[in-house]
Image (cartoon, helix red, strand yellow):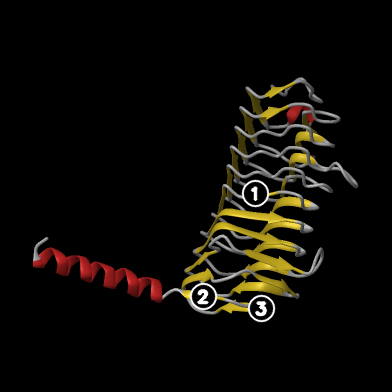
Amino acid sequence: MTIKGTLFIAVAVAVVGSALAGDTPITHCAFVVTAPGNYFLANDLGPCPPPFAINVAASKVRLRLEGHTIAGLGLEQGDGILATAVHDIKIKGPGTITGFDTGIRWQNIEDSEVKGVTASRHVNGFVIDGGSRNRFKQNVVSNNLRGIAIEGSNDTTLEENATNDNFGDSGIAIRAAHGNALRGNTANHNGCVGFGGFGIEIGNSARNRIEENTANGNCSGGIALQFGSTENEIEDNTALGNQRFDLSDDGPNCDANRWVENRFLTANQGCIH
């Protein structure tokens, strides 16, 4: 190898090492992110007492879980990762959040993403409350009381998430939220302990697109559009073996909702296809 080539490699290694050294390790509970930058879990955290394990209080933050676990004290005990009124946040797995009231709670967050995270044994797996243009991809949100809730948030995308076996309520619930997209998610065997739930539940929401999802074996129904939901598109989903109905729409003659090419056995109206 030439001297010039050796010098190039040495400089490249030095640059990469400097970038890694600039990342901020998170080593303890009740960590507050107050500045933009790259952060990573250096070890497992917990058991973490309320109100949170990590609070993202700055925009333009990248957080890697690095395969670690964030553990709480049990149901109804704070949030695993909390973020409020910031933007451009990226949380990347693999990693597990377990034993909180809510695994990840976002309040009025915009243009952000969660990918590859497992949330289990919470009251709520993920709550997206307000905000817009967020993306949740390839996460596992299972064995919670409730799975993923989108509440008043617009233009959010849920893609290829597994929301199975959430025992008290629905796998995915969209409430008073518009223009969201659910694509390629699984929502099986939800709501089978307690008061029951659906695989995917849409309430008082409009212009959402629900496509290529699977909702099988849920204990209140597969995919359900409740009163006040209109102009939604439900296309190419599979819903089989659900109690009550595989697919249901509470609007008269399906209101302005469009049901197309879904695979199912039972429905509550003939306008569902």
Q: Which residue is mark 1?
A: 140
Q: Position of residue 179 (x, y in %)?
A: 60, 46
Q: Which residue is mark 3?
A: 30
Q: Are marks 3 and 1 in contact (CB under 8 Å)?
A: no
Mark 3: secondary structure: loop
Mark 2: secondary structure: strand
Q: Are marks 2 and 3 in contact (CB under 8 Å)?
A: no
Residues packed near mark 2 inside 10 Å, few (<14), some (14 to 19) or many (20 plus): some
Q: Position of residue 239 (x, y in %)?
A: 72, 29
Residue type pointed to by label 3: Ala
Name the quadrant containing residue 50.
bottom right
> Which label lies toward us, 2 or 1?
2
> How far, Cα to Cα, is label 2 from label 1?
24 Å
Q: Position of residue 80 (x, y in %)?
A: 68, 67
Residue 140 seen in this snapshot? yes
Residue located at (74% from left, 39% from top): 199
Mark 1: secondary structure: strand
Give the quarter of the figure containing the C terminus: top right
Above or below, 135 against 7 in this view is above
Q: Which residue is mark 2?
A: 25
Give the quarter of the figure containing the N terminus: bottom left
Residue located at (63% from left, 41% from top): 208
Please name whichever residue, 118 or 157, is drawn nearer the observer in this view of the structure.
Answer: 118
Q: Earlier in the sequence, mark 2 or mark 1?
A: 2
Task: Kindly give the residue lying farthest to the right in the view shown.
Answer: 194
Residue type pointed to by label 2: Pro
Name the quadrant containing residue 210.
top right
